Image (cartoon, grey):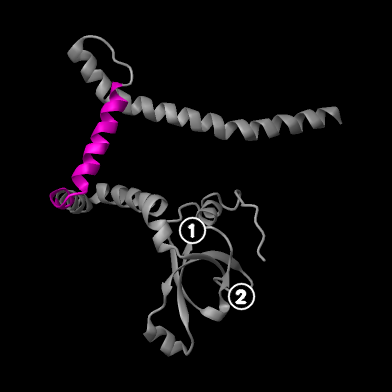
Amino acid sequence: MKMKKIRKIFFTGLLAIIPIAGTIYLMFWFLNLVDSIFRNPIEKLVGFPILGIGVVITVCITLLTGVIATNYLGREVIFFIDKTIRRIPIANSIYTSMKQLIDTVFMEQKNAFKSVVLIQYPSKGIYVLGFITSIAPELISDIVGEPMKNIFVPTTPNPTTGMLVMIPEKNIICLRMPVDAAVKIVVSGGILVPEMNEN
């Protein structure tokens, strides 16, 4: 009995420490990677190591890119680079995937996903989380004979891909759940479930 309790405590501690250790490791790995890009050439130039210079230069370049991207000429240059990369076969798929992921998480998510809903899909009795994106085209509602809404059903673990389905408003169950909480559920495959009650 005592061994079972020790095993339970050990695994509880393991589950708690893995995400913390993993996050710290990945942060240090990323910072070291960024730092090494500029650190090595600068060390050869000045003759001695300057710790953290790569990170500082990367931050400055990012800020400079942000300044450029906020004016008309800069936007045109970025648009040209964007269009050029999209024409390169392998680079196109990598660039598009990364851009979609970043747009979904940081920029488009709050505007594109209006609210979280529960719908029966792909068949009756099977429920999935979805996001209302907009009202369905009037033509579709007229053909069906009732108001319809566009629902984006994301896939796990990449919420940037999924299915667009059009559902009658009467068949949509609206949830009092923040969009970011629903995205966490989808990304984690249901492992991360927010504690909230539907009234």
Pointer 2 local density, CA inside 10 Å: few below 14, some 14–19, many at least 20? few
Q: Earlier in the sequence, mark 1 or mark 2?
A: 2
3D distance between C-alphas at marks 1 and 2: 19 Å
Is residue 53 left or right of 12 when viewed as pictured?
left
Using the image as rendered, state which of residue 161 and residue 76 is in the foreground: 76
Using the image as rendered, state which of residue 5 and residue 178 is in the foreground: 178
Q: Position of residue 133 (x, y in %)?
A: 43, 68
The residue at the point 29 percent across, 21 percent down is 53
The quadrant in which residue 138 appears is bottom left
Instruction: Return the residue at label 1.
Output: 155
The quadrant in which residue 118 appears is bottom right
The residue at the point 29 percent across, 32 percent down is 59
Q: Position of residue 180 (x, y in %)?
A: 50, 54
65 falls in the magenta region:
yes
The residue at the point 21 percent across, 47 percent down is 69
103 falls in the magenta region:
no
Please state the extent of the stretch shown in magenta in the rendering.
53-76
Instruction: Return the residue at label 2.
Output: 124
Is residue 2 left or right of 57 when viewed as pictured?
right
Q: Amino acid at mark 2?
A: Lys
Q: Position of residue 79 (x, y in %)?
A: 18, 53
Most common SS among magenta residues: helix
